[in-house]
Amino acid sequence: MLLLHLLMIVMACFGPPSAWGQPLSARTLSGEELLRIGEIHDVQNHFPEALTYYDQALSSFRAHKQRKGEAVVLTKIAAIFERQGRRQEAAVQIRQALTQFSKTPDSPVHADALFLSARLSLWLGAREEAAVLLEQAREQYRRSKNVQALGSVRLQAGLLKVSDDSPDEGLREIQQVLDDARARRDYEQTLAALVALGDANWILDRTDRAITHYEQSIALLEQRPQATVEAGLRFRSAALSSVNGREEQGIDSAKRAVTLSQSLRDVSREAAAWTLLGSLHATLGHDLDAEDALQRALGIYRQQALVVHAVRSTSPSSATSPKESRLPALP
Protein backbone atom coordinates (compact mmCIF):
# COMPACT_ATOMS: atom_id res chain seq x y z
CA MET A 1 0.00 0.00 0.00
CA LEU A 2 2.83 2.37 0.89
CA LEU A 3 4.65 1.51 -2.33
CA LEU A 4 1.52 2.27 -4.36
CA HIS A 5 1.15 5.62 -2.59
CA LEU A 6 4.76 6.53 -3.37
CA LEU A 7 4.30 5.55 -7.00
CA MET A 8 1.27 7.83 -7.28
CA ILE A 9 3.28 10.74 -5.88
CA VAL A 10 6.11 10.13 -8.38
CA MET A 11 3.68 10.00 -11.29
CA ALA A 12 1.94 13.19 -10.13
CA CYS A 13 5.27 15.01 -9.95
CA PHE A 14 7.03 13.66 -13.04
CA GLY A 15 4.31 12.38 -15.33
CA PRO A 16 3.86 8.85 -16.78
CA PRO A 17 6.84 6.48 -17.00
CA SER A 18 7.17 7.08 -20.76
CA ALA A 19 8.14 10.70 -20.06
CA TRP A 20 10.60 10.08 -17.23
CA GLY A 21 13.59 9.73 -19.49
CA GLN A 22 12.93 13.05 -21.23
CA PRO A 23 14.49 16.32 -20.07
CA LEU A 24 12.00 19.00 -19.00
CA SER A 25 12.74 21.02 -22.15
CA ALA A 26 11.75 18.03 -24.31
CA ARG A 27 8.09 18.39 -23.44
CA THR A 28 5.85 21.41 -23.72
CA LEU A 29 4.60 22.88 -20.47
CA SER A 30 0.86 23.48 -20.32
CA GLY A 31 -0.65 26.91 -19.76
CA GLU A 32 -1.55 25.89 -16.20
CA GLU A 33 2.02 24.80 -15.46
CA LEU A 34 3.46 28.02 -16.88
CA LEU A 35 0.94 30.00 -14.83
CA ARG A 36 1.96 28.23 -11.60
CA ILE A 37 5.66 28.85 -12.23
CA GLY A 38 4.87 32.50 -12.89
CA GLU A 39 2.97 32.70 -9.60
CA ILE A 40 5.97 31.31 -7.70
CA HIS A 41 8.12 34.13 -9.07
CA ASP A 42 5.28 36.63 -8.54
CA VAL A 43 4.99 36.06 -4.79
CA GLN A 44 8.75 36.53 -4.49
CA ASN A 45 8.54 39.83 -6.41
CA HIS A 46 10.67 38.42 -9.23
CA PHE A 47 8.71 40.47 -11.74
CA PRO A 48 10.72 39.91 -14.96
CA GLU A 49 10.66 36.15 -14.46
CA ALA A 50 6.97 36.17 -13.51
CA LEU A 51 6.05 38.20 -16.58
CA THR A 52 8.08 35.87 -18.81
CA TYR A 53 6.13 32.82 -17.65
CA TYR A 54 2.81 34.68 -17.65
CA ASP A 55 3.42 35.75 -21.27
CA GLN A 56 4.11 32.13 -22.24
CA ALA A 57 1.04 30.93 -20.35
CA LEU A 58 -1.05 33.58 -22.11
CA SER A 59 0.14 32.36 -25.52
CA SER A 60 -0.67 28.78 -24.56
CA PHE A 61 -4.17 29.61 -23.32
CA ARG A 62 -4.91 31.66 -26.43
CA ALA A 63 -3.63 28.91 -28.73
CA HIS A 64 -6.00 26.44 -27.07
CA LYS A 65 -8.86 28.99 -26.82
CA GLN A 66 -9.02 28.68 -23.02
CA ARG A 67 -10.71 31.96 -22.12
CA LYS A 68 -10.74 31.43 -18.37
CA GLY A 69 -7.00 30.77 -18.29
CA GLU A 70 -6.39 33.79 -20.51
CA ALA A 71 -8.45 36.01 -18.21
CA VAL A 72 -6.61 34.79 -15.10
CA VAL A 73 -3.18 35.43 -16.64
CA LEU A 74 -4.18 38.89 -17.86
CA THR A 75 -5.29 39.72 -14.31
CA LYS A 76 -1.95 38.51 -12.91
CA ILE A 77 -0.02 40.63 -15.43
CA ALA A 78 -2.17 43.68 -14.67
CA ALA A 79 -1.56 43.22 -10.93
CA ILE A 80 2.22 43.26 -11.47
CA PHE A 81 1.95 46.37 -13.62
CA GLU A 82 -0.07 48.07 -10.89
CA ARG A 83 2.57 47.19 -8.27
CA GLN A 84 5.24 48.63 -10.57
CA GLY A 85 3.28 51.87 -11.02
CA ARG A 86 2.59 51.06 -14.68
CA ARG A 87 -1.10 51.74 -14.27
CA GLN A 88 -1.94 52.64 -17.86
CA GLU A 89 -0.57 49.31 -19.03
CA ALA A 90 -2.39 47.59 -16.18
CA ALA A 91 -5.67 49.19 -17.28
CA VAL A 92 -5.27 47.79 -20.80
CA GLN A 93 -4.63 44.28 -19.49
CA ILE A 94 -7.48 44.30 -16.99
CA ARG A 95 -10.00 45.47 -19.57
CA GLN A 96 -9.08 42.47 -21.72
CA ALA A 97 -9.34 40.19 -18.68
CA LEU A 98 -12.86 41.42 -17.81
CA THR A 99 -13.95 40.89 -21.41
CA GLN A 100 -12.83 37.25 -21.22
CA PHE A 101 -14.34 36.72 -17.75
CA SER A 102 -17.72 37.87 -19.14
CA LYS A 103 -17.63 34.85 -21.48
CA THR A 104 -16.72 32.23 -18.86
CA PRO A 105 -18.30 30.71 -15.73
CA ASP A 106 -17.64 32.48 -12.43
CA SER A 107 -14.07 32.36 -11.16
CA PRO A 108 -12.63 33.64 -7.85
CA VAL A 109 -10.08 35.62 -9.86
CA HIS A 110 -12.96 37.49 -11.54
CA ALA A 111 -13.56 39.32 -8.26
CA ASP A 112 -9.85 40.19 -8.07
CA ALA A 113 -10.05 41.60 -11.59
CA LEU A 114 -13.06 43.74 -10.71
CA PHE A 115 -11.31 45.08 -7.60
CA LEU A 116 -8.13 45.86 -9.51
CA SER A 117 -10.14 47.54 -12.26
CA ALA A 118 -11.87 49.68 -9.62
CA ARG A 119 -8.53 50.84 -8.20
CA LEU A 120 -7.26 51.70 -11.67
CA SER A 121 -10.49 53.58 -12.45
CA LEU A 122 -9.94 55.66 -9.32
CA TRP A 123 -6.42 56.48 -10.46
CA LEU A 124 -7.78 57.49 -13.87
CA GLY A 125 -10.36 59.75 -12.20
CA ALA A 126 -13.39 57.64 -13.20
CA ARG A 127 -14.91 57.68 -9.73
CA GLU A 128 -18.46 56.67 -10.68
CA GLU A 129 -17.14 53.72 -12.68
CA ALA A 130 -14.93 52.77 -9.73
CA ALA A 131 -17.92 52.79 -7.36
CA VAL A 132 -19.84 50.40 -9.65
CA LEU A 133 -16.85 48.07 -9.97
CA LEU A 134 -16.36 48.04 -6.19
CA GLU A 135 -19.96 46.99 -5.68
CA GLN A 136 -19.57 44.20 -8.24
CA ALA A 137 -16.36 43.00 -6.56
CA ARG A 138 -18.06 43.20 -3.16
CA GLU A 139 -20.89 40.96 -4.34
CA GLN A 140 -18.48 38.43 -5.87
CA TYR A 141 -16.40 38.23 -2.69
CA ARG A 142 -19.54 37.94 -0.58
CA ARG A 143 -20.75 34.97 -2.65
CA SER A 144 -17.37 33.24 -2.39
CA LYS A 145 -17.21 34.05 1.36
CA ASN A 146 -13.75 35.60 0.98
CA VAL A 147 -13.90 37.63 4.19
CA GLN A 148 -10.49 39.29 3.94
CA ALA A 149 -10.89 40.36 0.30
CA LEU A 150 -14.38 41.63 1.09
CA GLY A 151 -12.89 43.75 3.88
CA SER A 152 -10.33 45.23 1.48
CA VAL A 153 -13.10 46.22 -0.93
CA ARG A 154 -15.09 47.78 1.89
CA LEU A 155 -12.08 49.85 2.99
CA GLN A 156 -11.65 51.21 -0.52
CA ALA A 157 -15.39 51.87 -0.84
CA GLY A 158 -15.38 53.62 2.53
CA LEU A 159 -12.55 55.93 1.50
CA LEU A 160 -14.35 56.71 -1.75
CA LYS A 161 -17.51 57.63 0.16
CA VAL A 162 -15.52 59.86 2.52
CA SER A 163 -13.95 61.71 -0.40
CA ASP A 164 -17.29 61.94 -2.25
CA ASP A 165 -19.15 63.82 0.49
CA SER A 166 -20.60 60.85 2.38
CA PRO A 167 -18.12 60.99 5.28
CA ASP A 168 -20.28 59.50 8.02
CA GLU A 169 -21.25 56.48 5.93
CA GLY A 170 -17.66 55.99 4.78
CA LEU A 171 -16.21 56.23 8.29
CA ARG A 172 -18.79 53.76 9.60
CA GLU A 173 -17.85 51.24 6.94
CA ILE A 174 -14.13 51.55 7.68
CA GLN A 175 -14.75 51.26 11.43
CA GLN A 176 -16.85 48.13 10.88
CA VAL A 177 -14.01 46.53 8.93
CA LEU A 178 -11.60 47.43 11.75
CA ASP A 179 -13.89 45.95 14.40
CA ASP A 180 -14.37 42.77 12.37
CA ALA A 181 -10.64 42.40 11.72
CA ARG A 182 -9.84 42.79 15.40
CA ALA A 183 -12.49 40.21 16.29
CA ARG A 184 -10.92 37.76 13.81
CA ARG A 185 -7.43 38.71 15.02
CA ASP A 186 -6.55 39.50 11.45
CA TYR A 187 -3.34 41.50 11.81
CA GLU A 188 -3.00 42.57 8.18
CA GLN A 189 -6.56 43.83 7.86
CA THR A 190 -6.42 45.56 11.26
CA LEU A 191 -3.36 47.45 10.03
CA ALA A 192 -5.03 48.29 6.70
CA ALA A 193 -8.16 49.57 8.46
CA LEU A 194 -6.16 51.78 10.85
CA VAL A 195 -4.29 53.28 7.90
CA ALA A 196 -7.61 53.81 6.08
CA LEU A 197 -9.02 55.64 9.11
CA GLY A 198 -5.94 57.85 9.07
CA ASP A 199 -6.44 58.55 5.37
CA ALA A 200 -10.14 59.24 5.85
CA ASN A 201 -9.46 61.78 8.58
CA TRP A 202 -6.74 63.37 6.46
CA ILE A 203 -9.29 63.80 3.66
CA LEU A 204 -11.65 65.43 6.18
CA ASP A 205 -8.86 67.73 7.49
CA ARG A 206 -9.07 66.13 10.93
CA THR A 207 -5.32 66.26 11.36
CA ASP A 208 -5.06 65.19 14.99
CA ARG A 209 -7.22 62.11 14.41
CA ALA A 210 -5.30 61.20 11.26
CA ILE A 211 -1.96 61.35 13.08
CA THR A 212 -3.40 59.31 15.97
CA HIS A 213 -4.45 56.52 13.59
CA TYR A 214 -1.10 56.59 11.80
CA GLU A 215 0.68 56.33 15.17
CA GLN A 216 -1.54 53.37 16.08
CA SER A 217 -0.59 51.77 12.78
CA ILE A 218 3.13 52.33 13.43
CA ALA A 219 2.76 50.84 16.93
CA LEU A 220 1.10 47.77 15.40
CA LEU A 221 4.04 47.40 13.01
CA GLU A 222 6.32 46.87 15.99
CA GLN A 223 4.84 43.36 16.22
CA ARG A 224 5.66 42.53 12.59
CA PRO A 225 7.95 45.13 11.03
CA GLN A 226 7.24 46.08 7.41
CA ALA A 227 9.75 48.68 6.30
CA THR A 228 7.87 49.79 3.19
CA VAL A 229 4.60 50.35 5.05
CA GLU A 230 6.30 52.11 7.94
CA ALA A 231 8.22 54.41 5.59
CA GLY A 232 4.95 55.54 4.02
CA LEU A 233 3.27 56.06 7.39
CA ARG A 234 6.23 58.02 8.75
CA PHE A 235 6.08 60.24 5.69
CA ARG A 236 2.36 60.87 6.08
CA SER A 237 2.69 61.61 9.77
CA ALA A 238 5.56 64.02 9.09
CA ALA A 239 3.64 65.74 6.30
CA LEU A 240 0.69 66.39 8.63
CA SER A 241 2.82 67.53 11.57
CA SER A 242 3.34 71.07 10.30
CA VAL A 243 -0.43 71.60 10.09
CA ASN A 244 -0.89 71.45 13.85
CA GLY A 245 2.45 72.74 15.07
CA ARG A 246 4.18 69.38 15.60
CA GLU A 247 7.22 70.16 13.47
CA GLU A 248 9.73 68.67 15.91
CA GLN A 249 7.79 65.41 15.96
CA GLY A 250 7.51 65.63 12.19
CA ILE A 251 11.29 65.96 11.86
CA ASP A 252 11.76 62.72 13.78
CA SER A 253 9.24 60.96 11.51
CA ALA A 254 10.84 62.37 8.36
CA LYS A 255 14.29 61.23 9.48
CA ARG A 256 12.93 57.75 10.09
CA ALA A 257 11.34 57.79 6.63
CA VAL A 258 14.74 58.69 5.13
CA THR A 259 16.47 55.84 6.97
CA LEU A 260 13.84 53.29 5.98
CA SER A 261 13.89 54.45 2.34
CA GLN A 262 17.66 54.07 2.24
CA SER A 263 17.43 50.54 3.65
CA LEU A 264 14.86 49.73 0.98
CA ARG A 265 16.99 51.41 -1.72
CA ASP A 266 13.88 53.35 -2.73
CA VAL A 267 15.46 56.51 -4.11
CA SER A 268 12.18 58.18 -5.09
CA ARG A 269 10.77 57.81 -1.58
CA GLU A 270 14.11 58.88 -0.08
CA ALA A 271 14.17 62.06 -2.17
CA ALA A 272 10.61 62.89 -1.11
CA ALA A 273 11.52 62.32 2.55
CA TRP A 274 14.62 64.55 2.31
CA THR A 275 12.50 67.28 0.69
CA LEU A 276 9.90 67.07 3.45
CA LEU A 277 12.63 67.08 6.11
CA GLY A 278 14.14 70.20 4.57
CA SER A 279 10.76 71.92 4.56
CA LEU A 280 10.18 71.10 8.25
CA HIS A 281 13.64 72.38 9.21
CA ALA A 282 13.01 75.58 7.24
CA THR A 283 9.72 76.15 9.06
CA LEU A 284 11.57 76.05 12.40
CA GLY A 285 14.37 78.30 11.13
CA HIS A 286 16.99 75.52 11.01
CA ASP A 287 18.57 76.99 7.89
CA LEU A 288 21.71 74.83 7.73
CA ASP A 289 19.79 71.59 8.32
CA ALA A 290 17.18 72.65 5.77
CA GLU A 291 19.84 73.42 3.16
CA ASP A 292 21.59 70.09 3.77
CA ALA A 293 18.36 68.08 3.42
CA LEU A 294 17.27 69.89 0.27
CA GLN A 295 20.71 69.46 -1.32
CA ARG A 296 20.54 65.74 -0.62
CA ALA A 297 17.11 65.57 -2.29
CA LEU A 298 18.37 67.58 -5.25
CA GLY A 299 21.32 65.24 -5.66
CA ILE A 300 18.99 62.25 -5.89
CA TYR A 301 16.70 63.97 -8.39
CA ARG A 302 19.70 64.83 -10.59
CA GLN A 303 20.83 61.20 -10.54
CA GLN A 304 17.33 59.99 -11.44
CA ALA A 305 17.30 62.25 -14.48
CA LEU A 306 20.16 60.17 -15.91
CA VAL A 307 18.31 56.84 -15.64
CA VAL A 308 17.06 55.35 -18.92
CA HIS A 309 13.79 53.48 -18.34
CA ALA A 310 13.14 50.06 -19.83
CA VAL A 311 11.25 50.08 -23.11
CA ARG A 312 8.29 48.18 -21.63
CA SER A 313 7.73 50.78 -18.94
CA THR A 314 5.61 53.46 -20.58
CA SER A 315 4.48 55.14 -17.37
CA PRO A 316 6.87 56.11 -14.54
CA SER A 317 6.32 54.69 -11.07
CA SER A 318 5.76 58.19 -9.70
CA ALA A 319 2.90 58.94 -12.08
CA THR A 320 -0.14 60.68 -10.68
CA SER A 321 -3.74 60.50 -11.74
CA PRO A 322 -4.86 62.75 -14.61
CA LYS A 323 -7.57 63.89 -12.25
CA GLU A 324 -6.04 64.57 -8.84
CA SER A 325 -7.58 62.38 -6.15
CA ARG A 326 -8.40 63.67 -2.72
CA LEU A 327 -7.05 60.45 -1.29
CA PRO A 328 -3.54 60.99 0.13
CA ALA A 329 -0.90 58.94 -1.65
CA LEU A 330 2.34 57.52 -0.36
CA PRO A 331 5.44 59.13 -1.89
Image: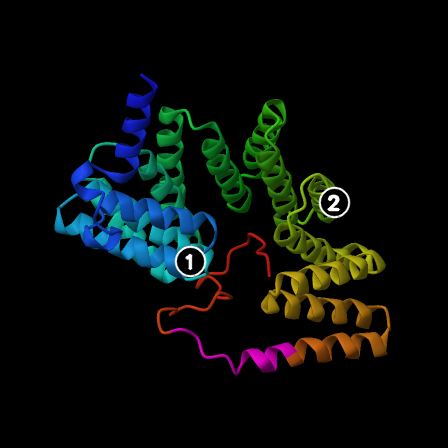
Residue 55 vertical position relative to residue 29 in the rendered view, above or below: below
**331 lies left or right of 28:** right
Q: Which residue is drawn at 71% across and 67% down?
A: 276
Disc 1 versus disc 2: nearer the observer: 1
- Quadrant of the drawing holding the C terminus: bottom right
Q: Is residue 155 above or below residue 40?
A: above
Asked if the residue at tag 2 contacts the one at tag 1, i.e. Cβ–Cβ closer than 8 Å, the answer is: no
Relative to 240, is 72 on the left or the right? left
Q: Is residue 217 visible to us here?
A: yes
Counting residues from the N terminus, which is met first, the one under dot 1 or under dot 2? 1
Figure quadrant of the N terminus: top left
Q: Nearer the viewer, residue 271 or 210?
A: 271
Rendered location of residue 179, percent (x, y): 62, 26
What residue did someone put label 2 on?
215
Pinpoint residue 317: horizontal percent, then vertical percent.
Answer: 48, 65
Q: How would you rate the neighbour count of disc 1 (Cα within 10 Å): few for under 14, some for 14-19, many for 20 or more? A: some
Kindly give the residue lying farthest to the top in the view shown: 1
Q: Tell whether 303 sits left or right of 133.
A: right
Q: Nearer the viewer, residue 312 or 33?
A: 33
Q: In this view, does 256 lie to the left or right of 232?
A: right
Residue 178 placement: quadrant: top right
Label 1 – label 2 distance at C-alpha? 32 Å
Q: Which mark is residue 47?
A: 1
Mark 2 lies on a secondary structure that is: helix
- Range of magenta residues: 300-310
Query: Is residue 307 within the magenta segment?
Result: yes
